[in-house]
Image (cartoon, grey):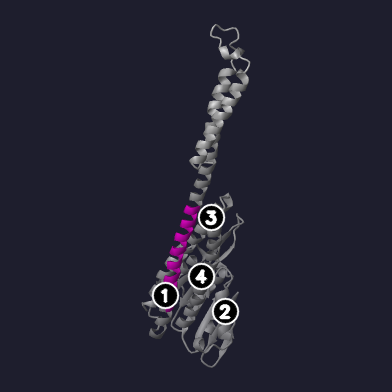
Amino acid sequence: MTSALVYRSDEVTEYDDLAAARAARGTTWVHAGDADRAEMDRIADCFDLHPLTVEDILNDVRPKTEEYEEYTFVLVKRAMLRRGDTTFDEEIKDVPIGVFIGDDWVVSMTPDSAEPVARVRRAVDSGDERLLHRGPDFTAYRIIDVIVDEYFTLLDAIEDDIEAVEDQVTSSTELDTLEEINSVRRELLSFRKLAWPTREAVGVLARGDPRQIQEDTEKYYRDVYDHLVQLVDLTETYRDLASGARDIYLNTLAQSTNEVMKVLTVVATIFIPLTFVAGVYGMNFGDSPFNMPELGWTYGYPAVMIGMIVVALVMLGYFSRQGYV
């Protein structure tokens, strides 16, 4: 769905004709949401946009900023947690949003719905003075700022998952706990691959390299850049916490395994002499020249049983003093 509007300090006007909107006096903003390639090409022809930028929006390209003679192209991505297509775990899904900043116009395009852009659009419709009195570079800033603000919400959700995992690792060795840890680590890795290039892209705008970025607007982009630096630092911190939770889980699992092995070792050690005695006296020596004299002894059987019980109690007492049982 494509919408075009022209706004000045005193009014906001919607247009159906893209050419008329571009020629109108004021700041022209054209947004194409849920747009296909044909719709994007139509807008690109009207504003003389390079076809490779349209391909970047449609393909899985990392966030970036590119300067052209008549405009600056910024590709950012909206990120959200939602249920995966092939798994029941939540995954980070990103939606590319292309923003073109001209001298008196701005174009935003995305192949999916874009709530951040809609929020800025509603601010224009409601007569936000900061938007109406500034140029297209400020409108682009507002779009990028709303997208980056959503990153904090996403990281807050991941932080809650990390806290839940940390509560489980010290008391549970279930396989589900390890899967949750790995899921959090995958989410952080995906977000890191998104946040780093976004910081680089916004850094170009914060330095004021493109001529379309006014000096008064640079400070706003620097504020977004600072937020991205904070997001990257938080991501690294959360990755360390997730790795620490995994190490604690593995240590807990190893400790649990050691406890089981202790019990099995105690049982096996106690039964080794008992098995030896039972094996020796279980053989038939009745017709052998090496006949054991105690086989014919009246108290032979009770003596052997008492001996095995004494050996078992001695071994059990030893392991008890060593702290194994």
The amino acid type, in three-letter code, at marker 4 is: Tyr
Q: How much space separates mark 3 and mark 2, taking CA atoms?
A: 41 Å
Residue at label 4? 151
Residue at 50%, 88% in the rendered image: 130
On screen, 299 above or below 82? above
**Mark 3 or mark 4: whose residue is earlier in sequence:** 4
Mark 3 and mark 4 residues within 8 Å of each other at the beta carbon: no
x, y (%) of residue 137? 45, 81
Residue at label 1? 226
Q: Secondary structure at mark 3?
A: helix
x, y (%) of residue 153? 54, 71
Residue at 43%, 78% in the rendered image: 223
Residue at 55%, 76% in the rendered image: 117
Question: The C terminus appears in which quarter of the rendering?
Answer: top right
The amino acid type, in three-letter code, at marker 2 is: Arg
Residue at label 2? 119
The numbered disc on residue 169 is: 3
Magenta segment, which residues?
223-248
The amino acid type, in three-letter code, at marker 3 is: Val
For residue 277, what is the image quadrant?
Answer: top right
On screen, 218 above or below 243? below
Q: How much space separates mark 1 and mark 2, taking CA atoms?
A: 22 Å
Q: How much space separates mark 3 and mark 1, taking CA atoms?
A: 34 Å
